[in-house]
Amino acid sequence: MLQEFFAVVAAPFVGSFLGVVVKRLPAGEEIIAGRSRCDHCSATLGVPDLVPIFSWAWTRGRCRHCGAGLGWFYPAIELAAIAVAVACIIADSGAPVRFWLDCFLGWALLAIAWIDIEHLILPDMLTLPLLLAGLAVVGWEAPDKLGDHALAAACGYLLFRAIGYVYRRLRGRDGLGEGDAKLLAAGGAWLGLVSLDALILVAAGIGLTWAAIAWLGGRRLDLASAVPFGAALALALFTLRLI
């Protein structure tokens, strides 16, 4: 139980870091070296401002320096990181190494999904290391299955690239981006060839559910509407890994 407790305690700090990644990576800003600042007054934030969840709650969601509202982004992603850890505790009880691997996967996918929802991009800096990590994990867990998972990664990438090419030729615009193909390749690396079709079907179901909810909420959707399918892929991958 000690590692589960540690993961839950560490999760909001991981979520806080993921929030920095989500904010800075798409903008091309420095992630590690850059100091945290208020988006409104640019005041440098110190330790009292950066304790996950508690700092936000203590200041009632406002900057301690200028009083401007900070929004829900950081507490939301910190709570989501805790939810990832809890899901891994439920799925991987009694398997400590797999537990930490799945936490790593879930947290990485959380950042990927959030960026896709906000910016409709899937950065290579996140998807490609995730692909390599999947192959490395399989090589360590089940070396005899490494070829199958490498083939799944290649098939996933080529499949989505082919679909994207055909869509672009028929419609004159991009449908599936190259980032989606790379994320599907990462999914193939983690799950293997036998689960590739399930990954696509589950992701499609999640994407359709999101579209239905958006439509019921009053958002106008048509064939040209952009859907963050990478986020659906990320959720499907994490779900299938835990099953």
Image (tube, rainbow, N blue to C red):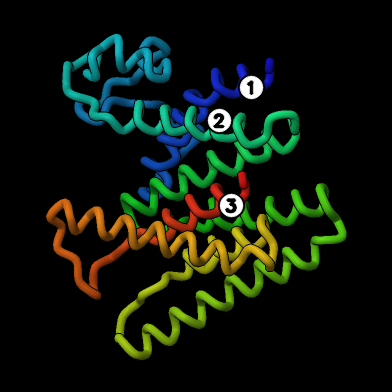
Labels 3 and 1 touching (C-beta < 8 A): no
Seen from this angle, which residue lies furthest right? 144
Label 3 vs 2, first from the N-terminus: 2
Residue depicted at 51% across the width and 77% down the height: 161
Q: Secondary structure at mark 3?
A: helix
Q: Secondary structure at mark 1?
A: helix
Label 1 vs 2, first from the N-terminus: 1
Label 3 vs 1, first from the N-terminus: 1
Residue 23 lies, with reference to residue 51, above or below; the image says below
Q: Nearer the viewer, residue 63 or 79?
A: 79
Residue depicted at 48% across the width and 31% down the height: 83
Q: Nearer the viewer, residue 93 or 187?
A: 93
Amino acid type, callout 2:
Ala
Q: Position of residue 53 (x, y in %)?
A: 38, 19
Seen from this angle, which residue lies furthest bottom? 170
Labels 1 and 2 touching (C-beta < 8 A): yes
Q: On the picture, is 123 further left or further right than 143?
A: left
Specify the label residue 85 is tagged with: 2
Specify the label residue 4 is tagged with: 1
Quadrant of residue 9 within the rendered picture: top right
In this rendering, the label closer to the viewer, 3 or 1: 3
Name the residue carrying label 3. Answer: 240
Amino acid type, callout 3:
Leu
Amino acid type, callout 1:
Glu
How far apart in space, not on screen, are marks 1 and 2 (Cα)? 8 Å
Q: Residues within 10 Å of mark 1 (few under 14, many from 20)?
A: some
Residue depicted at 40% across the width and 57% down the height: 206
Q: Position of residue 141 (x, y in %)?
A: 81, 48
Quadrant of residue 89 within the rendered picture: top right
Q: Secondary structure at mark 2?
A: helix
Labels 3 and 2 touching (C-beta < 8 A): no
Residue 153 lies, with reference to residue 161, above or below; the image says above
